[in-house]
Image: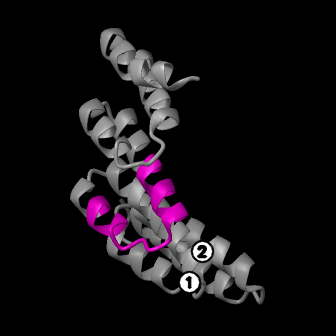
Amino acid sequence: MNAGSISDQDAATIFLDCAVVIANSIEGLEGRSDILSLIAVKYAAAGQLDTAVDLAETINDSYLRDQALAGVSAKCIEVGAADYADKLSETIEDETAYALATEQMALAYAESRAFEKAIEVAHRLTESAPTLSRISLACAAAGVLFFAVLVAIPSILAVP
């Protein structure tokens, strides 16, 4: 690397920092909140979890803030910070946003092939059958067919 160049991670951070400045200049509350939410998830994807949460916490509308935290929670699992995701999801107050976070977390576990944890998280949901179906598909896609069938059975039995 040349003496005057910056790393890809530093460049990404600078880009996200600039995006925050631009987002904060947006006058509409909902538009600004949507952009800040997306940027928070990008910070989490870059492994900057505290920055992601701090940014999400700046969103004034509690429902939109909880939606941002839901997205960050799922991204935490993808970057290997499952404990952080669990603690963060517990701070979500809105029931709908909490259910969204729980579903996204379960699917993130499934995509990382942590199927048992995915099922455990899915069972936190009042209506877990759709999420279990998606976990079953992830199992099948990973070639774990027997487990896919075991996961799908409760979903199949739930159909009236």
Q: Is residue 12 visible?
A: no
Number of callouts: 2
Instruction: State the extent of the magenta-drawn residues as a range.
Output: 85-104
Q: Residue furthest front?
A: 160
| Magenta region includes residue 160 | no
Question: In this rendering, which labeled residue sits more in front, label 2 or label 1?
Answer: 2
Circle 1: element type: loop
Residue beneath the point at 51% across and 87% down: 58
Where's the N terminus, which quadrant?
bottom left
Label 1 packing within 10 angstroms: few (<14), some (14-19), many (20+): many
> In this view of the protein, which residue sits in the foreground, 10 or 114?
114
> Is 157 placed above or below 36 here?
above
Question: What is the image's colouring?
Answer: one colour
Residue 30 located left or right of residue 1: right
Q: Which residue is mark 1?
A: 59
| Residue 104 x %, y % | 46, 48
| Residue 42 x %, y % | 50, 62
Circle 2: element type: helix
Question: Looking at the picture, which amino acid does disc 2 mark?
Answer: Leu
Residue beneath the point at 36% across and 10% down: 145
Q: Which residue is mark 2?
A: 64
Residue 124 located left or right of residue 83: right
Label 2 packing within 10 angstroms: few (<14), some (14-19), many (20+): many
Q: Are marks 2 and 1 in contact (CB under 8 Å)?
A: yes
Q: Residue furthest top?
A: 146
Residue 76 located left or right of residue 97: left
> Is 64 placed above or below 12 here?
below
> Is 6 placed above or below 125 here?
below
How far apart are the two marked residues, 2 and 1, measured between alpha carbons?
A: 7 Å
